[in-house]
Image: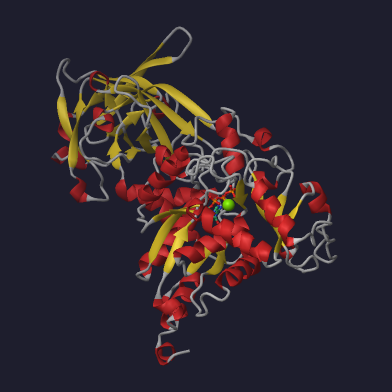
Amino acid sequence: MNENANHAEPAEKKGLNFIEQIVANDLANNKNAGRLQTRFPPEPNGYLHIGHAKAICMDFGVAQKFGGVCNLRFDDTNPQKEDTEYVEAIKQDIEWLGFKWGNIYHASDYFDQLYQFAIRLIEEGKAYVDEQTSEQIAQQKGTPTQPGEDSPYRNRPVAESLELFQKMNTGEVPEGAMVLRAKIDMANPNMHFRDPIIYRVINKEHHRTGSKWKVYPMYDFAHGQSDYFEGVTHSICTLEFVPHRPLYDYFIDELKQGQDLDDNRPRQYEFNRLNLTYTVMSKRKLLALVQEGLVDGWDDPRMPTVCGLRRRGYSPEAVRKFIDMIGYTKFDALNDYAMLEAAAREDLNARALRVSAVLNPVKLVITNYPEGQTEEMEAQNNPECEADGKHTITFSRELWMERDDFMEDAPKKFFRMVPGKEVRLKNAYIVKCTGCKKDSDGNIVEVYAEYDPTSRSGLEGANRKVKGTLHWLSTAHCLPAEVRLYDRLFTVENPSADPRDFRELLNPDSLKVLTGCYVEPFAANNDTGNRYLQFQRTGYFTLDTHSTPDHLVFNKTVGLKDSWKA
Ligand code: ATP
Ligand code: MG
């Protein structure tokens, strides 16, 4: 420890999470020559989900906080599942979340170096080509309390392994016929040390290196080394990699041997992964939902993907607020989806433009309002933020109101439209309900009311107290719209822990499409640049990405209150 470190303020005191404390202490101790470099290492085999957002907030966040750099590294070591479509989507999502990478790297940038390193390990008797099947290899692995068995190929001559490894890379060896294994210790209590597979044959074009390679390194043989080549100081990942850490260090030690004797090296730190109730986070399952048409693409608003949340109407700030709320620990847990919604609600309350939308309309006629007359009523864009300004909404004799807001025979506490009672129409007049018209089946087709001309919002008469304020639209001054309401994607709290196939656990009612809704024009066309809306009294909404001027589609982001409470 140097002088400085002894005088540094203890990191725990600064309200830092445990990884930030480690980083603060390392910097204070001048580890890695006082450098801080992190990386976010997605495999481009799917779209990012909110779990990745948690990792992004950590990797980029800590670099930002302590003046370091965070690079984006595509962990592209398995061409079977990877694609440039994912590469582009990942970049877009990181930027949307509000982060900037230093450089973009690829694990495939190091294929040559990794291959040379593998050859060196073979030459040093520290790796060998195994011709057994993966089942045989698995059978010999032993258990944590029982040592494994040596492969019959473990002690084959170096020259033989060298020749075979080269053959593995020329296309002469079919997939699965041979692998390269590190020769470490078949009795090690850490199973990852029992001669891990470090290279396998994959006969598939790689999206960056084409057909140059037929052998591809395994995660454990690529990740730490890539960190080392790039100069990563803190390699932050999730808890399932804890048992991999000794192997991570082992390969870096082997790599450094004789070349770099100082203590410049990456170190791995782990935090708890994000698991959310009523959804799944596995890319394999999310991909299946997309490929089997069980959802409307990766950005289906019910998906836990970053693009799904975006399309649903979440702001990047809401996502980050949620990540902040749940924090980083060393224990895995299941986080409540309701917390994500609470974060969205809090964020959108401060951000959303208030507009009028009627989802289940019935006509309201103001019988004493002159036919053909209209008035422009002022509506505040956001009462939480004066600076957001105002817009106008047109009032007229014929309006739409919510069908649920009228009752002929209402209980006492129903402070809405009831014959003989007064109610305020938001930003407009106090009206008194005078009755309704029904069709031959008894369905209400029109509601009638009379307005008090002295009660216009802002006028003297407006001060009169009335319980209940309703939203409305002028039938001649609004736009038709489709509105999509979403519920949990899965019916069980923890689908990943359920023995049934995840497809059986899908909520058949997770999407409800309402047609015949109306919105004020400002909801669909305004030049504020703000895409976050509150349909007053209903919830938060946003225009769907597939919405067109001829067919408006809105997605419900979240309700005004938590409606999931049992
Ligand atoms: P796969 O299921 O294909 O292994 P993955 O979910 O691990 O994918 P990667 O692309 O390998 O996805 O992940 C990139 C980074 O995001 C890793 O550092 C990983 O630890 C982190 N990450 C992935 N899922 C979560 C999660 N649910 N919570 C927090 N971090 C996560
Ligand atoms: Mg992974």
**Residue 85 image offset from top left, x and y in percent:** 45, 37
Image quadrant assignment for residue 473: top left
Q: x, y (%) of residue 460?
A: 14, 40
**In the image as oriented, which residue stretches furthest toward the bottom?**
3
Residue 38 vertical placement versus 404 (above, below): below
428 left or right, relative to 56: left
Viewer can see residue 509? no
Nearest the viewer among 164 and 555 is 164
Q: Residue at x 24, y 30 (%)?
A: 525
Q: Position of residue 217 (x, y in %)?
A: 61, 53
333 to 89, vertically: above or below = below
Q: Residue at x 31, y 19 (%)?
A: 550
Q: Residue 54 or 146: which is nearer the viewer?
A: 146
Relative placement, left or right, of 155 versus 266 is right
Using residue 310 as the reference point, say whether residue 271 is left or right of it. right
Rendering coords of residue 78 (x, y %): 58, 45
Disc count in the image? 0
Q: Quadrant of residue 455?
A: top left
Residue at figure coordinates x 28%, y 34% from the top left: 424
Q: Is residue 20 visible?
A: yes
The colour scheme used to paint the residues is secondary structure
Viewer-closest of 383 and 281: 281
Q: Quadrant of the C terminus?
A: top right
Furthest-top residue in this view: 440
Q: Residue at x 22, y 36 (%)?
A: 427
On screen, residue 24 above or below 220:
below
